[in-house]
Image (cartoon, helix red, strand yellow):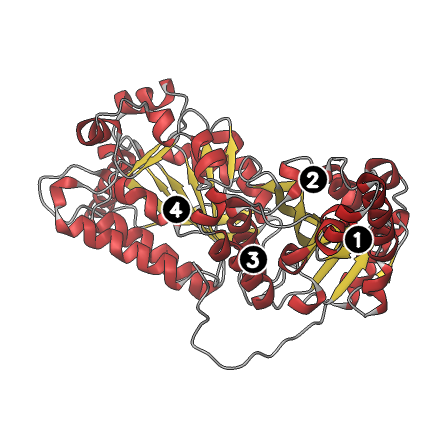
């Protein structure tokens, strides 16, 4: 190579490296120091924590803002691909040190490109969100950018897993893309999500509210239900995100990855007899029942702080990923209310979208009664669970642990609602309502006319219990496939899931259903 050509190439390479260094520094040392002082990692440090070492391949590093006069190195977002436990993922990481991570048109274009590539390849999309919202300087162009992202969130829903980590303040349009994804993870203290901030709330409603009170991680994890997971900081959130991916496939075309387990499939579970009291009025920890059954007691609970009367989460059973839905009788007696119905329905549909079998543990007296629930639309919200279970085509196994009454019997995936296999313990009871309520409704006049109403009521309740408060009437009608010893629970569940592995379902043609949203 001639000397002048070599010199020319050297100059071009030096210029390229200078540009790359400037982009890598984001908003500069001062802003990066401020980011660290707030307990937050930088956008690039987050990628290092999330991805397998050395696996990240950046795309669009030299993209610049659409409008002149805006200084935004790398357009304020780092995009590309990498691997997590050897599996491909596509990622974007917003850089709060660059114009507060605000989204402009080209910022959005970078995100859209990796989303498109993820779907074409068949790999999860992960967003590390830390954004003040739309870039005001770009006006309608920034709104257009958000529209392009939202559109892809919706069209690609159910195609590949979409996961959102909220690692800083996300306001305005910045909250809607995460809300359209499958799972939202938030960093406690550092992360906020709200449509309008405290200043706007104060000016419009005269309410004084802090960032944490308005849209903090705990608010969204416990009250609004927007956040599925909360962890202490960036590192903990990203570690949790890696764990979550272990239960999800690369795309809807695949099954979730198998996990090697040292837990014998035929392990007996006699401790379940000690955990669950046969008296239907006594509470017990359903979470412990679930952990006792699944592989190595590993259970990743989803929405742990929200609507705690229903438990949802992921586990492995015989090495296969499963989604678990369970009533928790220690919270509101395990009844189904508005929030619990929404929580369960959403989780069921997520499992079905990504080929994760659904295991349902039932101990439910019914839907929550009361004026607030009825006026709040419990009919509509409860119907979501019915719809979700009926719609799901993945293997579905139901275990009735204790009681299963009324409409909630159907909502917790009965045979009639599409369960492939329904099992029950000897403690199970399937009926329209509990013995006390049934005796009062059916025999009110007889009780009132008796010389000793209390004794008559007790006698009738005992008779009703003997006849209906057991699993054998339902088993005799074919609604329960088998009554099993609690110690054989794990073995039975593993065997049935194994037999159902090749399940295929054909449904009538339709554009899409009309779920009661």
The structure residue drawn at horizontal position 28% and vertical position 23%, both measured from the top left corner, is: 29
Distance from the alpha carbon under mark 1 to that under mark 4: 41 Å
Where is the C terminus found, in terms of image quarters? bottom left
Look at discs 2 and 1 and give the one toward the viewer: 1
Q: Relative to residue 455, is residue 202 depicted above or below?
A: above
The structure residue drawn at horizontal position 37% and vertical position 57%, both measured from the top left corner, is: 153
Give the secondary structure at mark 1.
strand
Distance from the alpha carbon under mark 2 to that under mark 1: 15 Å
Residue 117 is left or right of residue 263, and the answer is left
Q: Which residue is mark 1?
A: 429
Q: Which residue is mark 4?
A: 178
Could you say which is closer to the camera, residue 140 or residue 200? Answer: 200
* First in sequence: mark 3 vs mark 1: 3
User: Which percent across, then down, holds residue 392?
Assistant: 59, 65
Distance from the alpha carbon under mark 4 to that under mark 3: 23 Å
User: Which percent across, then down, holds residue 412?
Assistant: 65, 56
* First in sequence: mark 3 vs mark 2: 2
Q: Which residue is mark 3?
A: 385
Give the secondary structure at mark 3.
helix
Graded by Cα atoms within 10 Å as few (under 14), some (14 to 19) or many (20 or more), the crowding at tag 2 reads many
Q: Are marks 2 and 4 in contact (CB under 8 Å)?
A: no
Distance from the alpha carbon under mark 2 to that under mark 4: 32 Å
Look at discs 1 and 4 and give the one toward the viewer: 1
Q: Which residue is mark 2?
A: 329
């Amino acid at each position: 190579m001639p000397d002048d050509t070599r010199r020319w190439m050297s100059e071009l390479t030096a210029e390229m490296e200078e540009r790359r260094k400037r982009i890598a520094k984001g908003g500069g040392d001062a802003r990066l120091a401020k980011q660290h002082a707030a307990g937050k990692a930088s956008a690039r440090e987050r990628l290092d924590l999330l991805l397998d070492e050395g696996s990240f391949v950046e795309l669009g590093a030299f993209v610049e803002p659409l409008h002149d006069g805006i200084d935004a190195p790398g357009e304020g977002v780092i995009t590309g691909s990498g691997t997590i436990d050897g599996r491909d993922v596509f990622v974007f990481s917003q850089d709060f040190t660059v114009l507060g991570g605000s989204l402009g048109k080209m910022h959005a274009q970078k995100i859209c490109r990796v989303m498109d590539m993820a779907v074409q390849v068949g790999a999860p999309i992960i967003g590390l969100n830390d954004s003040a919202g739309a870039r005001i300087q770009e006006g309608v162009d920034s709104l257009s950018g958000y529209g392009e992202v939202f559109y892809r969130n919706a069209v690609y829903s159910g195609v590949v897993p979409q996961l959102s980590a909220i690692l800083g303040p996300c306001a305005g349009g910045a909250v809607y893309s995460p809300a359209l994804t499958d799972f939202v993870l938030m960093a406690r203290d550092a992360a906020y999500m709200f449509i309008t901030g405290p200043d706007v709330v104060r000016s419009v409603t005269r309410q004084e509210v802090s960032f944490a009170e308005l849209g903090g991680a705990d608010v969204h994890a416990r009250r609004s239900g927007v956040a599925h997971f909360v962890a202490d900081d960036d590192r903990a959130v990203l570690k949790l995100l890696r764990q979550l991916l272990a239960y999800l496939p690369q795309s809807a075309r695949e099954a979730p990855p198998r996990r090697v387990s040292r837990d014998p499939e035929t392990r007996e579970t006699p401790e379940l007899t000690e955990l669950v009291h046969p008296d239907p009025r006594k509470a017990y920890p359903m979470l412990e029942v679930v952990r006792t059954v699944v592989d190595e007691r590993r259970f990743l609970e989803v929405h742990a702080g929200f609507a705690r009367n229903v438990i949802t989460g992921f586990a492995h059973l015989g090495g296969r990923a499963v989604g678990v839905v369970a009533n928790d009788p220690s919270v509101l007696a395990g009844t189904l209310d508005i929030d619990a119905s929404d929580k369960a329905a959403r989780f069921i549909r997520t499992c079905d979208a990504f080929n994760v079998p659904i295991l349902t543990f039932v101990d439910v007296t019914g839907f929550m009664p009361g004026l607030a629930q009825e006026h709040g639309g419990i009919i509509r919200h409860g119907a979501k669970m019915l719809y979700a279970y009926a719609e799901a085509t993945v293997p579905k196994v139901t275990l009735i642990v204790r009681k299963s009454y009324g409409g909630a019997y159907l909502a917790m995936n009965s045979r009639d609602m599409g369960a492939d296999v329904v099992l029950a313990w000897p403690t199970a009871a399937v009926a329209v309502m509990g013995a006390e309520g049934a005796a009062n409704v059916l025999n009110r006049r007889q009780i009132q006319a008796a010389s000793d109403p209390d004794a008559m009521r007790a006698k009738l309740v005992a008779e009703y219990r003997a006849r209906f408060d057991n699993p054998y009437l339902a088993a005799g009608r074919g609604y329960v496939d088998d009554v099993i010893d609690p110690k054989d629970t794990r073995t039975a569940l593993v065997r049935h899931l194994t037999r159902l592995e090749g399940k295929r379902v054909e449904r009538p043609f339709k554009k899409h259903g009309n779920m009661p949203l």
